[in-house]
Image: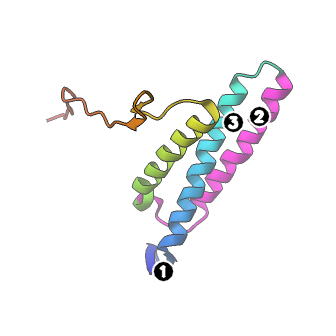
Amino acid sequence: MNLLLFAGGTMSRTTAILILLLAAILEAGGDAIVRVGLHKTLFWQKSVLFALAGVVLFAYGWTVNSPPWDFGKLLGLYVVFFFLTAQVISWLFFKQVFLGWDDRNKRLHIFVNPEMRISTPW
């Protein structure tokens, strides 16, 4: 099935989803490389990691902006992919647990704060 993404052309839904997933991996991966570089003490290590992060983040920008699509229509799905990818990278490479992960009971909890209010200007 084709999904209309831009004026005068189509792209399959599967292709669009895979491109968005690749973009999320590149963006979260580039961010992780910057994070590693920030904690290095030697100048050459920082330089190499920052240069590598620049290449990866450029690849992210190219991946998102080169298809002739309306990225705004796909932004919601991209945010989900980015969030999940960033969580997995943080867990695998930085040993940070998932938001809401209960290590003692090995369960994922979703917390909703009943006191949270959404402010509106009217």
Q: Determine the main secondary structure of the stretch shown in magenta.
A: helix
Q: Nearer the viewer, mark 1 or mark 3?
A: 3
Q: Nearer the viewer, residue 78 or 110?
A: 110
Neighbour tally class for label 3: few under 14, some 14-19, many 20 plus, Cα within 10 Å: many
| Label tally | 3
Residue 30, x across and y down, in percent: 65, 41
- Is 119 above or below relative to 69? above
Magenta span: 43-72
Neighbour tally class for label 2: few under 14, some 14-19, many 20 plus, Cα within 10 Å: many
- Is 106 above or below relative to 2? above
Kindly identify which residue carries mark 1. Answer: 8
Find residue 50 and report its image quarter.
top right
Kindly identify which residue carries mark 2. Answer: 49
Q: CA distance from mark 2 to mark 1?
A: 41 Å
Residue 122, x across and y down, in percent: 13, 35
Pointer 2 or 3: first along the chain:
3
Kindly identify which residue carries mark 3. Answer: 33
